[in-house]
Amino acid sequence: MQKRITIIGTGYVGLVTGVCLASRGHYVQCVDVLPERVEAIMDHRAPFYEPRLAELLAAERASGRLTATTKLDEAVVGSEITFIAVGTPEGPSGVELSAVCAAARQAGAAIGRAPGYHLVAMKSTVLPGTTETVVRDLLEASSGKRVGEFGLCMNPEFLREGSAIEDFLTPDRIVIGQWDERSGQTLAEVYQPFDCPKIFTTLANAEMTKYASNALLATLISFSNEIAMLCEATPHTDVGSVLQSVKLDRRLSPVVGGHLITPGILSFLWAGCGFGGSCLPKDVNALRAFARQRNLSPHLLDAVIKINAARPAALVRLVETAVGSLRGARIAVLGLAFKAGTDDLRDSSALSAIRLLSEHGALVTAYDSVVKAFPRGLEFDDLARICATPEETLRGADAVVVTMDSPEFSAWDWRRLCALMRQPIVVDGRNSLSKAAHQAGMHYITIGRMQEAEKPVSAIGLRSLA
């Protein structure tokens, strides 16, 4: 059943939602306050990088099912369903709701003029209770209608940056938090083409589900990194071997029909240099603030954030130990975004490592095939620059630091690249280059393992980095 849909917000969630729904036959109009974003979409161009997004956007623009505008009122009045998908950055109370409030207020005013029944679905990540109180109150006040005369849902997204299109088009579940049954059924019609479990629940349950999901993923990563920290201080242990054995527990990797099943969530049970991006750090911190507002102490979530914050410093300590001194050393950093397949620099562990390296006098060259510039306002006192090629990045380097698990890096000719370096030292913050490490000439250092002839990590210097 085709629907006329408005998406308020053309950021990561909003644009992916709009493009994917258009690809399933709906007529979608995206709304944004930034004219340059609207112009890019209308010109068949994606305003940010996400695999497959540009191609799918161009196809749906050509089909006529996807358009964009800055005129929110007209878009809402001309549609049946409005998704609010604006940003919800961290704020003093956990989540900054100014964009959500503005969208709800303007959407409500348009709904007041719109003929017939109109559904508003929250896509933005908000704390439990927000849709039922703040959003509902603004919609009612600005529309002059009561909820029930219009529909209200909370529909959290579960998109992974780097595979968002696939995640949306082949979802593992669709959660529909509903004010009433009519609201939920109206939203379910949008998702009729999608074959997956559809969970109908309360608005607050849907909101909490999003936070619980991201908190679990962040916890798995920090658990893995705490085990890595212990291995780094314990002779004859290796976090890769330890966690690989843990994953084979039949409760984690069951054997079904004679075949070993490795669930995707186990990819988060792996040590690295910390999680980042637009969701995990923000959502865990919001949930911590939410708990404290209720006089609760979120001890586990506090530990998750503390462990994560320490990983870039641990990585830099390995570099310092390998090269002897950071001051004046040339360090190449591979990967700038928080993960491969995206240009998202938010809470990137690579940027944290670069900042620490620069503060201690290292000269940093960085490479990322997608990211071409540091974010505005991030200054490294000319001690760090982004290079265009692997050769330019590694030439004359005293060490390489790998901060991203990218297939591209594994495919490089490391024998040739190491020959360009002053010292062929590779410190792998993702433990992703083990095959390449066997090539001659590379001194390969991994996380989660005590280096030979070293003291435990806790005894190494550079305490100011922690």
Image (cartoon, rainbow, N blue to C red):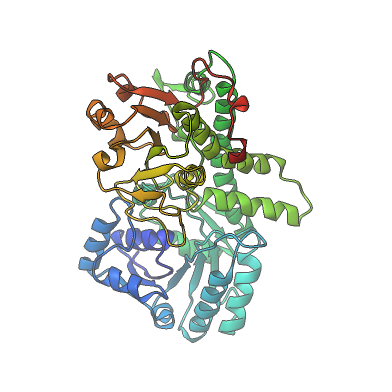
Residue ranking furthest to the top: 236
Camera sees residue 12: yes
Q: Nearer the viewer, residue 449 or 85?
A: 449
Tell me: residue 240, above or below residue 214: above
Give the total of numbered labels. Answer: 0
Tell me: residue 356, above or below residue 107: above
Camera sees residue 249: no
Residue at the image point whose x is 37% and y is 33% from the top = 398
Residue 294, position as x, y percentages in the image: 76, 55
- Kindly indicate the quadrant of the structure image that contains residue 69: bottom left
Residue ranking furthest to the front: 328
Residue at the image point whose x is 39% and y is 35% from the top = 402
- Kindly indicate the quadrant of the structure image that contains residue 456: top right
Residue at the image point whose x is 56% and y is 49% from the top = 281
Q: Nearer the viewer, residue 437 or 153?
A: 437
Residue 177, position as x, y percentages in the image: 56, 58
Q: Quadrant of the C terminus?
A: top right
Q: Quadrant of the N terminus?
A: bottom left
